[in-house]
Image (spheres, rainbow, N blue to C red):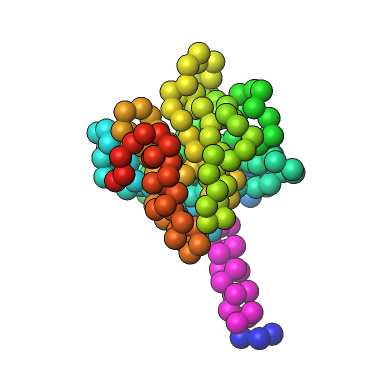
Amino acid sequence: MPFRLLCLFGLALLSCQASQEALPRSLHSPEGEAEELMRRAIELVAGGAAPYLYINQGGGQDGKTEPQWTQIDSLGTGQYRSLEVYNVFDNPGGDSREFFLLTFVVDLRDTSRRYPVQDIRFRATADTAYFTDVNPQELKLLDPEPVLRQGGLPVYAFDGFAHAGDLEPGFLRFWSPRAGSVLSWYGRAETFELMATGHPAWDAALPGLRAALRGHLGLSER
């Protein structure tokens, strides 16, 4: 085996071993959807890929940066499943970790319905993992055509509902089936913006993409 392929194989093997070691014993053979979701979230964080970097603009968190692990799977023409792990907290004592995640499935051809979003918090120990909080939210696609397309990133606009069944949206989310959330707008000048993904072409396109989206919203450049 060529040296480069051997190195890549070795890195993949180490990543797989690290992911397996991070799993609670109860998730080694997940039995249901909840267990499978927690397994995927833990493996996404433990897999070795650098997280995306976001920045808060405006509001009480202005300038604060936050990491997020994102995984998007194609389920067929126009259909995607998104998993975003937006926070990981190690509890004092080191006996457990808490994971905060968003998961949803969307069809980029269908603007007629709201898509369920699960905002989930779960705790993982060496033995088990279990949900500690679930907040149902919703997204509604505004147009089956991208509002922008730049650097290989088509970006779609969604109304976001902080609670399932809300009459009015609480935020506007610009989302790409390749890179996930690019910019979320919460009113006034408060945004949550993607700064870096580790993908050279996407990262080169992001400043212009964010500027175009801020212009679309009537916000000044930052």
Residue segment shown in magenta? 4-20
Of all residues shown, which one is farthest toward the top?
Answer: 167
Chief SS of the magenta region:
helix
Residue 96 on image: x %, y % = 43, 44
Residue 122 can be seen, yes or no: no
Q: In the image, what residue occupies the spot 53% across and 44% down?
A: 148
Q: In the image, what residue occupies the spot 59% across and 35% down?
A: 104
Q: In the image, what residue occupies the spot 55% across and 64% down?
A: 15
Using the image, determine if residue 30 lies above or below residue 115. Answer: below
Question: In this image, 134 relative to 211: left or right?
Answer: right
Q: In the image, what residue occupies the spot 32% across and 33% down?
A: 190
Residue 52 can be seen, yes or no: yes
Using the image, determine if residue 3 lies above or below residue 33. Answer: below
Of all residues shown, which one is farthest toward the bottom?
Answer: 2
- Name which quarter of the figure residue 155 lies in: top right
Using the image, determine if residue 66 lies above or below residue 135. Answer: below
Using the image, determine if residue 62 lies above or below residue 205. Answer: above
- Name which quarter of the figure residue 170 lies in: top left
Question: In this image, 9 relative to 52: left or right?
Answer: right
Question: In this image, 21 relative to 195: left or right?
Answer: right
